[in-house]
Amino acid sequence: MLELASLGAKVLHIRSVEAAGKHNMPLRVLSSFSPDDGTLISFEESDMPSNVVSGIAFNRDECLIEVKGVPSGTQYIAKILKLFAENGIEIDMINQVNHNFEKIDYAFTVHLNDYLQALDLVTEQKAQLSAQHVSGSTTVAKVSAVGMGMKSHSGVASLFFDALAQENINVVLVSTSEIKISVLIDEKYLELAVRALHKAFLTENR
């Protein structure tokens, strides 16, 4: 639930989930439109079965910044990250493409609220970074699959990307953890991607 909340599921506020986890307090999510028992969120016993994927989350407030043709060397990405940190800008996803160990292309995602400032900062530092090109895009979105079952099931990533490939949805960036796969895609394909992933993993969970 902490992963889902941080990825934009918008069911529970992330601080409420953190507080409940810290004090080992169960949470029950109820609907004001339905009298049922809702969903109980608590720590599971290790021998309890888990769905491979518990939920699909998405976030439309992601923006992409690309810094291309930077000379090889850790000092350059360190400069970029320090620049963002000094201005209170949080980075979500990071990717780099190395061209024969000579030039590197960096890609970052930041929140929509920080996009213009982040793009201006990197553009101003283009010469100091020895970058060949700086660009950005606001027409992207992040979609994620989250589930404790990912830790013990192989083939989750294969199913995830196959579902997107079936709909001809290209991926810009990828980020993973033990229980999460996130991708950045063109925003116009977001609803299609969410439906495709729901269909793929709903069938798998059954």
Image: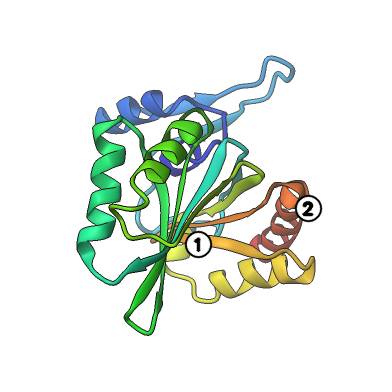
Residue that protrudes farthest toward the bottom in the picture: 100
* Mark number displayed over residue 23: none
Mark 1 or mark 2, which has the lower sequence index? 1
How many numbered discs, if any? Answer: 2
Q: Is residue 1 at least partly visible in the picture?
A: no
The span from disc 1 to disc 2 (Cα, nearest Å) is 18 Å
Q: What secondary structure is marked by label 2? A: helix
Q: Nearer the viewer, residue 37 or 94?
A: 94
Q: Quadrant of residue 99?
A: bottom left
Measuring from the top left, give residue 42's x and y in whole percent.
Answer: 41, 37
- Taking 182 as reference, is 178 left or right? left
Q: Tell me, for residue 174, which label it has, or none.
A: 1
Describe the element under mark 1 as helix, strand or loop: strand
Q: Image check: 164 left or right of 174? A: right
* Residue nearest the observer in this picture, 18 or 193: 193
Residue tagged by mark 2? 192
Neighbours of disc 1 within 10 Å: few (<14), some (14-19), many (20+)? some
- Amino acid residing under circle 2: Leu
Tell me if residue 137 comes above or below residue 97 in the rendering: above
Q: Is residue 131 above or below residue 115?
A: below
Q: Position of residue 16 (x, y in %)?
A: 39, 23
Q: Amino acid at mark 1?
A: Val
In which quadrant of the rendered view does residue 73 lie?
bottom left
